[in-house]
Amino acid sequence: QVQLQESGPGLVKPSQTLSLTCTVSGGSITTNYYYWSWIRQPPGKGLEWMGVIGYSGSTYYSPSLKSRTSISRDTSKNQFTLQLSSVTPEDTAVYYCARGPNYSDYELWGQGTQVTVSS
């Protein structure tokens, strides 16, 4: 079955760029017609969708994060990557990658990875 696994540093300093990778196993990230999203949950708050890369490689971002967010993929490794620039402590959250049939429905999730922004 398809599984998703997030990886990346657990601690990032303010003003730096946060970089996380989602490794997908059991299925290809280019398979029609799936969308691969990054979602986060700050402590004590709800889930926030950050952006998505589609099966064709097209990307879409949350308007509130668009200026700082980039999502890319490496099809040879079956991975997609999140970069969030100029981080602040408000970017501290559990970050999830997920798969869905569109931008807002998610049928598979990674286990999540905690990222703390602190000096």
Image (tube, grey):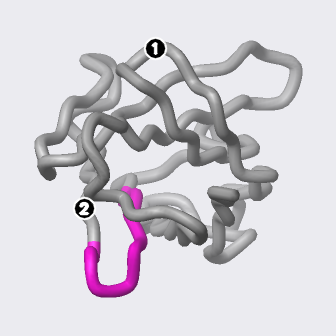
Picture coordinates of residue 58 (x, y %)? 12, 42
SS for dot 1:
loop
Is residue 103 left or right of 55 when viewed as pictured? right
The tag on residue 15 is none
Q: Give above or below for 61 relative to 110.
A: above
Identify which amino acid the numbered label 2 is placed on.
Ser
Task: Give the residue at x 80% y 52%.
Answer: 111
**Which residue is found at the position 32% from the left and 19% from the top?**
64
Q: Is residue 91 toward the left or the right of residue 87 in the image?
A: right
Vertical position of residue 50 compared to residue 24: above or below: above
Give the residue displayed 66% in from the left and 76% down from the top. 9
Q: Earlier in the sequence, mark 2 or mark 1?
A: 2
- In terms of depth relative to the viewer, which is nearer, 80 or 19? 80
Viewer-closest of 37 and 33: 33
Q: Which residues are magenta?
A: 74-83
- Residue at the spot of label 1: 104
Query: SS at mark 2?
Result: strand
* Mark 2–mark 1 distance (CA, rounded to whole Å): 19 Å
Residue sitting nearer the eye, 99 or 111: 99
Amino acid identity at mark 1: Ser
Assess whether residue 78 is covered by the magenta stretch.
yes
Q: Circle 2 sits on which residue?
A: 72
Residue 75 rendering spot, x and y as whole percentages: 26, 75
